[in-house]
Image (cartoon, rainbow, N blue to C red):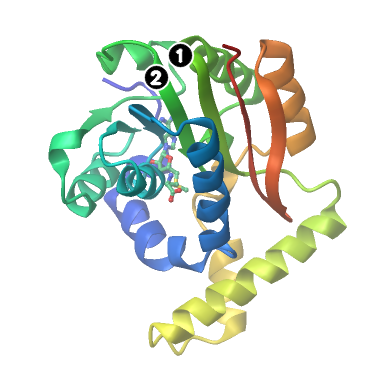
Amino acid sequence: MPETSTEWQSAHLARTYLEGVRGAIPLAEQQLDVLLTIVRNWLPRLGTVVDLGCGDGILGRTVLREHSHAQAWFIDISPAMLQAARDALPDGARARFVLADLAQSDWRDRLALPGPMDLVLSGFAIHHLAHERKRALYAEIHALLAPGGVFLNLEHVASPTPTVEALFEDHFVDHLYAYHRRNGNRQSREDLARTYYARQDKEENILAPVEEQCDWLRRIGYEDVDCFFKCFELALFGGRRGV
Ligand SMILES: C[S@@+](CC[C@H](N)C(=O)[O-])C[C@H]1O[C@@H](n2cnc3c(N)ncnc32)[C@H](O)[C@@H]1O
């Protein structure tokens, strides 16, 4: 069983995130659009994909929709999230759902993968790990990839200064407020901001700058490393394994 104890294992936080936060992420559609462009170009015959810290499986599901023969492994530490991922995927035959802890290096053993993977994705999950563990995980992912395989991390990254961080927070609260208004929530922006700043999972965020994380990937041996998208603290970065 997973050894990490995290707020994410609570069904309440899973519901709060999926119903109250995921839909409010600024530029979420554009992030998926950039991700799909990379996959379409670099992996036109995508066969296998892993979604790490999958939540309700939004990233893996988006890729499966476009690649009708691909198979996916959805991994999360939260049983409630894995159930949400199962419920959201109509064609369950192409997917496996695995309870595993990315903080432990044995996460790969739990997947029973048939061989090297074409694509490893992760969305807003790896920033919950300590920096040393992030680096080790990026190396474990590299070892899991087939030649030419791709790793894409859509991630919450660090701002360079508190002043820039405040810009992100303000932008995010604006989007949160607009999302909740659209869904009939009449809470004031101030109330929403208060709840957002006091949220229980905030202290589990261990953010690293995207430039530093791209450097880690290059040192591990990833090629074509880049930050493909960035808006304040939201970044899509990654690279691929040489052929
Ligand atoms: C912010 S949610 C993101 C979910 C989804 N990837 C998305 O883009 O919406 C973070 C996810 O990472 C999972 N998670 C957190 N720590 C984890 C760990 N140590 N091992 C595996 N999953 C973890 C949580 O349960 C949660 O589903």
Identified at 19% across, 45% down, the residue is 86
Three-letter amino acid code at disc 2? Met
Name above or below for residue 123 compared with residue 211: below
Mark 2 crowd level (few <14, some 14–19, many ≥20, 10 Å Cα): many
Asked if residue 228 lies left or right of residue 87, the reply is right
Q: Nearer the viewer, residue 57 or 221?
A: 221
Instruction: Give residue 152's position: percent from left, percent from top.
Output: 55, 34
The answer to whether the residues at label 2 and label 1 have Cβ atoms under 8 Å apart is yes
Amino acid under disc 1: Ala
Image-quadrant location for residue 167: bottom right
Give me the C-alpha separation between circle 2 and circle 1: 5 Å
Q: Is mark 1 within 8 Å of ligand 1?
A: no
Q: Nearer the viewer, residue 101 or 108?
A: 108
Determine the residue positioned at 45% across, 28% down: 120
Direction from residue 208 to residue 20 in the image, left or right: left
- Per the rendering, the mark at residue 146 is 1
> Residue 180: percent from the left, percent from the top?
46, 79
Secondary element under disc 1, as helix, strand or loop, is: strand
Q: Quadrant of residue 184?
A: bottom left
Pick the residue in front: 104 or 111: 111
Q: Is residue 62 left or right of residue 201?
A: left
Residue 209 visible within the image: no
Check mark 2 vs ligand 1: CB closer than 8 Å? yes or no: no
Which numbered dot is residue 117? 2
